Image (spheres, rainbow, N blue to C red):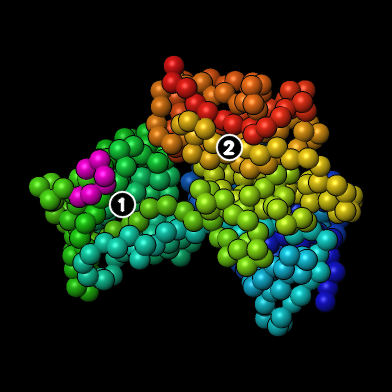
Amino acid sequence: MKQHAIVIVGGGPAGMAAAVAAYDRGVTDVVILDREPRLGGILQQCIHNGFGLHKLGRELTGPEYADVYARQVAERNIAVYYETMVTSVSPDRVVTARNREGILKIQAQAVILAMGCRERSRGALNICGTRPAGIYSAGTAQKLINCDGYMVGKRVVILGSGDIGLIMARRMSLEGAKVEAVCELMSYSGGLTRNIVQCLEDFGIPLYLSTTVVQIHGDKRLEGVTVAQVDENRRPMESTRRFIPCDTLLLSVGLIPENELTEVCGIPMDPVTGGAMVDESCMTKVRGIFACGNVLHVHDLVDYVSDEAERAGKGAADFVKNGKASAGEYLQTKAGHGVRYVVPQQLRRDVGDVDLFLRVTQPFGKVKFTVTAGDKVLAVAKRLKAAPGEMERITLKQALLQDAQGVVTVKLEEL
C-alpha cells in the first residue's frame, strides 16, 4: 500500500489544474493517475483554436492549452502514473488501479475525481435501421482524423448541434467532405453562438432544428439516412420524412460524466447534472473526496474547467493541512424558475466570495437572475441573452452570504 497526500484520478485539463493548484497551496505530495500515455485528455485531439481566451488571455489550440499545464506539472515534479486505470475509490480514500506492473493501491488523505465525460452512443438513441460502417460519435471521428490521420467519410450528416458536432462540421468541410446537414432534435442549438457562426454559417452548412434521424440505410457501408421533423412532444411527423444520401453519420447527442467510480464510492449524485453533489470547494458529501471538471457537470469552455479544478485542488490541500476540521454549517442551493441546475449544491457562509454555476432550461432574450435566501436578496445579474449551451456564473459576496438563512435559490425573470 502506497501513501500519498493527494491522489488525482485523470490527467486531463481538470486533473492537471487541480494538481498544480494543490501543490502551490502547500501540499507537494500529489500524484496523478491517468489511463493515457500522456497528459492532456481530450484536448490532445482538439486541434482547433479558441482555448484559453478567458483563463490565459490568449487563443490556443487544445494541445497547446494542455501543454501549458503539462509543463507546470513537470516543473513541480508532480508524479504521474501513465497508462494506469483506476478501478475503484473507497469512502476511506483507498484508490485501486491497474497498470503493466500489476495492481496498485494508494491510501490518500484526499482524492480528486477528474475523469471527464464520454459521448452518448447510437445504442442510447434507438434509431431503427441497419448497422453499416460509417456511423461514428463526433468525438471518435475527431480523434480518427486529427490523431490517426484517417478520413472517416466524404458525404456527411451530423445529428446533434452540440459544440463537438458543430466543430466537426467545420473540420469535415476543411478536409474536403460535403456536410449535407446538421440535424437538431430541439428547437434550438445546444452549442455556443460563436461555433454556430464559425462552423456552420461561414461554411454554408444548413442547420435543421426540431429534426432528427429516424432511419439508417445501408448494408456494408452507410448509404443514407431518413430524417423527419418532430412535434412539440419530440415525436417524428411522418409527413415530413425525407431521405438524405450520405456515407457517414456523426452523432453529437450529448455528453455523460464518467461517474462510475463516484457511484461505486457511494457519493450522492445530482440527477440533473449527472455528477456528484459538492460544496463550494468541490468536496463531495464523502469528506476528503473532491470532484471537478466534466465529471462534475459538462462545461462548454475548458477555461471554466481549469478554474473549477483549481478550487478543487486548493480545497483538497486545505483538507489535508487542516485534518478533520469541522465542515461548518451548509446552505443548500436550488434551481428556481428558468434554471436547470445550480453548482455547487451546498455552500458555507464563512469561506469568502462564492461562485454559482448554472444553466437555463431554454433560450431566453434579456433576463435577470436573482439569488435569494429566504427573503434576502444575495445577488442580481442581468444578461442580454441566455441559452442552455452557455454556462452562467454568478458571484455571491461573503458580506451578504454570512447572514443568509434558508435555501439559496436562483431564479430567472424575462425582461
Residue 386 in the figure: left or right of residue 351: left
Measured Cα–Cα span from mark 1 to mark 2: 32 Å
Asked if the residue under mark 2 is in contact with the one under mark 1, i.e. CB atoms within 8 Å, the reply is no
348 is within the stretch colored magenta: no
232 is within the stretch colored magenta: yes
The numbered mark at residue 334 is 2
Residue 163 in the figure: left or right of residue 86: left
Where on the picture, by quarter, is residue 372? Answer: top right
User: Looking at the picture, how far across and down is residue 178, in whole percent?
Assistant: 25, 50
Determine the secondary structure under disc 1: strand
Q: Residue at x 64, y 26 (%)?
A: 374
> For mark 2, does the 10 Å Cα neighbourhood hold few (<14), some (14 to 19), or many (20 or more) residues?
some
Q: Residue at x 13, y 46 (%)?
A: 240
Q: Examine the rendered structure and indicate whether residue 28 appears above or below residue 239.
A: below
User: Which residue reaches farthest left?
Assistant: 239
User: Looking at the picture, how far across and down is residue 346, in whole percent?
Assistant: 68, 41
Q: Examine the rendered structure and indicate whether residue 210 appears above or below residue 99.
A: above
Where on the picture, by quarter, is residue 334? Answer: top right
* Residue holding disc 1: 159
User: Looking at the picture, how far across and down is residue 382, in whole percent?
Assistant: 53, 20
Note whether residue 93 is visible.
Answer: yes
Tell me which segment is drawn in magenta. Answer: 231-236
User: Looking at the picture, how far across and down is residue 399, in whole percent?
Assistant: 77, 23
In-front residue for pair 330/67: 330
Residue 181 in the figure: left or right of residue 238: right
> For mark 1, does the 10 Å Cα neighbourhood hold few (<14), some (14 to 19), or many (20 or more) residues?
many
Callout 2 amino acid: Lys
Q: Residue at x 82, y 76 (%)?
A: 1
Q: Residue at x 36, y 39 (%)?
A: 189
Callout 1 amino acid: Leu
Note whether residue 304 is visible.
Answer: no
